Amino acid sequence: QHKGSTSGADEAQSSILFASLMTEITWIWKFVRKTPGEVIKARREQRPSDIRFNDIQRVEGNPNPTNEDRLFRGVAQRSLALQFLKFESQLLANRTCRRQGLIPTFVRNHLYVTNPKFAQQCIQAGQKQLRVEEALRSAMGQKEDPRAGTGISALTALTITPFKYLRLMQIPSFIGHLLLDSAKVDLPPRESVEGSGGPVTIRVHILDVLEHISKWFNDFQKCYDGTLTPLLDVSFANVDFKEGIDISSARQLDHPILQEVDKARDLNGEAG
């Protein structure tokens, strides 16, 4: 249910992110008309290294990355965070590891990367995406559906700097903006309208946009990760993303993933 207002000390940064996000909706609204398969096929060039870092580094230091570059960067970071979550859950379930230093251990033993520190930052950025998704699901009353609300990560991927500087403690304020009755945008209809005599747009609430985008983004993530199978652990490559990975299960295991992310509150320590 949409709400009427947001408040709190974190309003400024969440407002910046929200405003930036709203300007990007039209692009993603049109882009998801393509199938995930055709997007991946047109983009992917198999390399012996972990291609996720190629997708991320294509944007780092680039003052004018395309929206498609940004989207691939975001889905690559999210892929890394999902792989780490699966790795961590298995270790904790088997009680075979310490909880300290899990990310460095994971990077060292499971990723093909020459810059471990950069890899850790990428995972933390992906973890923040998952944290925002979890908060949105909670706000929408859809905690039990890990596939709900994932489209927010497609949009935040397009807003590189504002999302980078969003602190974890500011996430509730940001979610509050998405719930406002006024959070609407004019978009072209998904089906062409003939005989209209001019441009046609429809007024859509962002939550309805996210519902539409999330279905596409879940398939996009699955298709993206499917190209990584030679580089990934079999256990991760065989994850059925039809069911999704529920970050809330971390709480059931007293999972430290949120504690790990919370350590990145210092802006210099967060990757966006």
Image: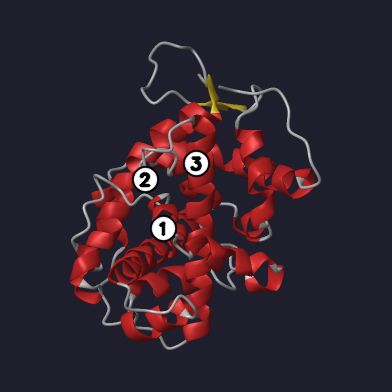
- The residue identified by callout 2 is 217
Question: Who comes first in sequence, dot 2 or dot 1?
Answer: 1
Q: In the rendered image, is residue 58 in sight? A: no
Q: Is residue 42 above or below residue 121?
A: above
Residue at the disc numbered 3: 27
Please state which of residues 147 and 162 is positioned toward the viewer in this rendering: 147
Q: Residue at x 21, y 67 (%)?
A: 235
Residue type at mark 1 is Val
Q: Amino acid under label 3?
A: Trp
Tag 2 secondary structure: helix
User: Percent x, y for residue 131?
Assistant: 52, 52
Mark 2 or mark 3: whose residue is earlier in sequence: 3
Q: Earlier in the sequence, mark 3 or mark 1?
A: 3
Q: Nearer the viewer, residue 183 or 68?
A: 183
Label 3 vs label 1, nearer the camera = 1
Q: Residues within 10 Å of mark 1 (few under 14, many from 20)?
A: many
Residue where numbered disc 1 is placed: 75
Q: Is residue 18 above or below residue 189?
A: below
Question: Please, what secondary structure does the residue beneath circle 1 have?
Answer: helix
Of the pair 12 and 82, the residue shown nearer to us: 82
Q: Identify the residue at horizontal 70%, vertical 69% (top origin).
A: 266
Q: Is residue 142 left or right of residue 86?
A: right
Q: Amino acid at mark 2?
A: Phe
